Image (spheres, rainbow, N blue to C red):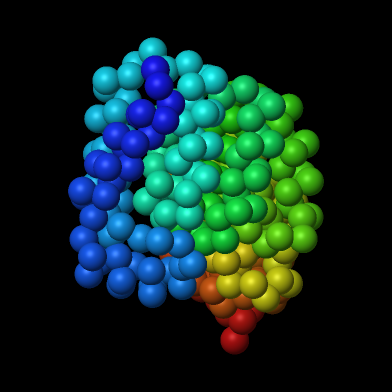
Amino acid sequence: MSDRGVTREIVAALRAAGDPERAVQEKRYLKSELTHFGASVPAIRKVLTGFARHHPALNRRELVALVEELWAAPVHEQRMAAVELLDLYGSLLEPSDLALVERLIRESRTWALVDGLAATVTGGLVERFPELGDGLDRWASDEDFWVRRSALLALLEPLRRGEGDFDRFGRYADGMLEEREFFIRKAIGWVLRETAKKRPRLVAGWLRPRASRVSGVTLREAVKYLPDEDREAILAVRK
């Protein structure tokens, strides 16, 4: 497979799926410094799932090279495509690839790229290679709030299924409860909300002694799926 030839094909398909008006609106909404083609997320995914169907034998070297090629250009859709590829071919990734994912997170500077890299790509890696939890521990105290957010969201998918390491999430979240950064507060609430769908008592038990410390942004998300009695008791602490 010619990496550059395939990259050109993907970029051409992304550009063709774009809409100039949408590009302007999206760039403004995301406060983005990148170029935007104006392709929607479903359209981007369609391009990449089509690619995956035609390249089922892609190997790790080819995957990493393609991701690097797409990411190198300061184009939002190309970087979204790189994230999608890492998700679609996640089974090819090895523990050492966490360094690549971390670099992409640091270069993203927007939830639109970070969240996929964190929740699905990093999350998948950590599920397959639990020893990478040490890397998440480091992320949880990183100076970059996008990296800290990623430590939280990397634990989301198994917690959403009613599984996962809630103790690790709880440690991370407890250390970030006083943060004023919106994207940290939102991430804590998001993970608590999704965990509560399967294990509401666990979430209520964690929230109750911390109710006076939790931000309003976090709390609004976290209590959505709690039993009425628990929700009212937790909210009463805030009044």
In the image, residue 169 sits, relative to residue 206, either above or below, namely: above
Q: Could you tell me if residue 110 is visible in this image?
A: yes
Residue drawn at point x = 78 percent, y = 55 percent: 141
Count the labels in the image.
0
Q: Quadrant of residue 136?
A: top right
Is 68 or 207 nearer to us in this picture? 68
Residue 124, horizontal then vertical, whole percent: 54, 32
Q: Could you tell me if residue 201 is visible in this image?
A: no
In the image, residue 3 sits, relative to residue 181, either above or below, namely: above
Residue drawn at point x = 30 percent, y = 72 percent: 25
**Residue found farthest to the bottom:** 239
In the image, residue 214 sits, relative to residue 83, either above or below, namely: below
Specify the quadrant that holds the C terminus. bottom right
In the image, residue 235 sits, relative to residue 167, either above or below, namely: below
Residue drawn at point x = 57 percent, y = 66 percent: 183
Residue drawn at point x = 60 percent, y = 50 percent: 105
Residue 102, horizontal then vertical, whole percent: 65, 43
Residue 190, horizontal then vertical, whole percent: 51, 58
**Residue found farthest to the top:** 57
Is 8 or 71 nearer to us in this picture? 8
Residue 83, horizontal then vertical, whole percent: 46, 41
Specify the quadrant that holds the N terminus. top left
Is 170 or 223 nearer to us in this picture? 170
